[in-house]
Image (spheres, grey):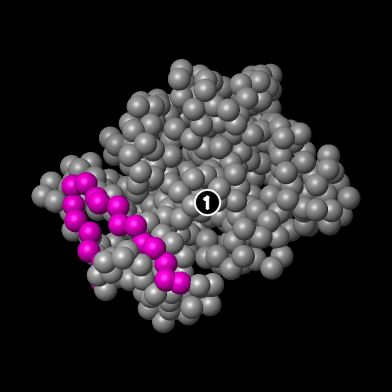
Amino acid sequence: MRLIALSIVALSLAASSSAQSGPFTVTLVPPVHGTLRLAPALPADGKYPAGSVVTVTTTPDAGYALDSAWYSVPGRFGQMYRENMTPEFKVAIDRDKRIGASFIEKAAVEDLVATHDVVFAKPGVKPLKYDVYARKGSRNLPIVIIIHGGGWTANDEDIMRGLARELTKGGKFVVASLDYRWAGTADGDATGNTMANLIEDVFGGIAHIMEHAAQYGGDPARIGVTGDSAGGHLSAAAALMPGMIGTRGFGKTPGVFEFLPSYLPKGKTAEQVRDEMLKAIKAAAPSYGVFGGSMLNPYSAEHAEDPAWKEAIAPLSHIPDAKVRAVPQFLTRGTNDRLIADAGVKEFVDALVKAGQRAEYIQVGGAGHAFFDWKPDDATKATFAKYGVYYAAAMRAFFETTLY
């Protein structure tokens, strides 16, 4: 959730409206390979008055580039980061926060063109957006679309930028990292978002990326999807279930479950988008995801235990026969993953094989959950370096065999 587009006035209003007391403690995390400056300067006691707006300015050392400037607060998965990719950003002080910056070797990104915060829809409080990564000079390349994880209720597209950078290596792919509404009221929406809404956001984002593919150097007719954890489920749904795109509603009529994308290109019907995606999405790499209906939450109080609703959001229940539509799959899971069971992934793989689909399942020895994530903290970066880089290369090789 970057703060690039927010004005000082908006930040001040947000801070003053949400502040319960003050002052608040700001912990400045010393950056490595660069410097960080706060204005106004952090007071000697480490506290700012409630409602303060602090300007954070970053400067990388020679040979390095900004990865992100950030603040973090405690959340569902430990420290939850809000990141900004420009050298200066503003932070509203409405609670205790940590502020820092992450820098990366310049050689890793100097030929990389990153387009941040492309907004494709705003069906609720949060603008839905994606980032695009491509090596300089990219033209008419296949597009790999990443869908982030976070229990369907946390994180955003920033957390997948490490994987995005790895997949662009070699200059054979344009990569987009996609955000979506959070389930329930986690975004602040008055009416809770169902799992069907999240899937509709994924289809809407893909439709927008396909529509604008040429300006990113991509080919809209060659699409691969990937994602981890919750994004593993959503990417599998995107790959296997575009045939369910339509206008008849999700569960409004008994036995009818259709997804209306949260974005449709001007002049195109949902049915046209459906047919284009069925042809364009040619492969998927869903990582440590949930695929069966019994383990999925519809995020609808009325239909929480409705088996029809659960099946309608389950990729396991919508695998096409490969003779009708082939969608090769590349799956990974860490052997120390305590959230996703091996049996659940194997069930999905077995069903894919039974349908004649090409399916490759790699058990990553010693890895836990979310090893494809990228955050500013050293532990997450180390996990990505140990497991993510190697298996991103394997994923890239898979997409080369399926999108070329």
Query: Residue at 60% of width from left, 51% of height from top?
Result: 153
Residue 316 falls in which quadrant of the image? top right
Residue 25 is inside the magenta segment: yes
Residue 61 is inside the magenta segment: no
Residue 274 x %, y %: 64, 50
Please provide the residue range marked out in magenta: 22-39
Q: Please state which amino acid type lies under the numbered disc 1.
A: Gly
Which quarter of the rendering shows the N terminus? Answer: bottom left
Whether residue 374 is visible, yes or no, is yes
Pick the residue in front: 209 or 268. 209
Residue 96 x %, y %: 44, 62
Identify the residue position indicated by label 1 in the image: 75
How many marks the image carries: the answer is 1
Tag 1 secondary structure = strand
* Disc 1 crowd, CA 10 A, few/some/many (<14, 14-19, 20+): few
Whether residue 236 is visible, yes or no, is no
Residue 144 falls in which quadrant of the image? top left
Residue 243 x %, y %: 68, 44
Pick the residue in front: 11 or 269. 11
Image vertical order of residue 99 relative to residue 323, above or below: below
Query: Residue at 55% of width from left, 48% of height from top?
Result: 76
Query: Residue at 83% of width from left, 49% of height from top?
Result: 303
Q: Is residue 367 left or right of residue 316?
A: left
Residue 126 x %, y %: 55, 65
Query: Residue at 84% of width from left, 53% of height from top?
Result: 302
* Dominant secondary structure, magenta: strand
Looking at the image, the residue that sits furthest to the front is 45
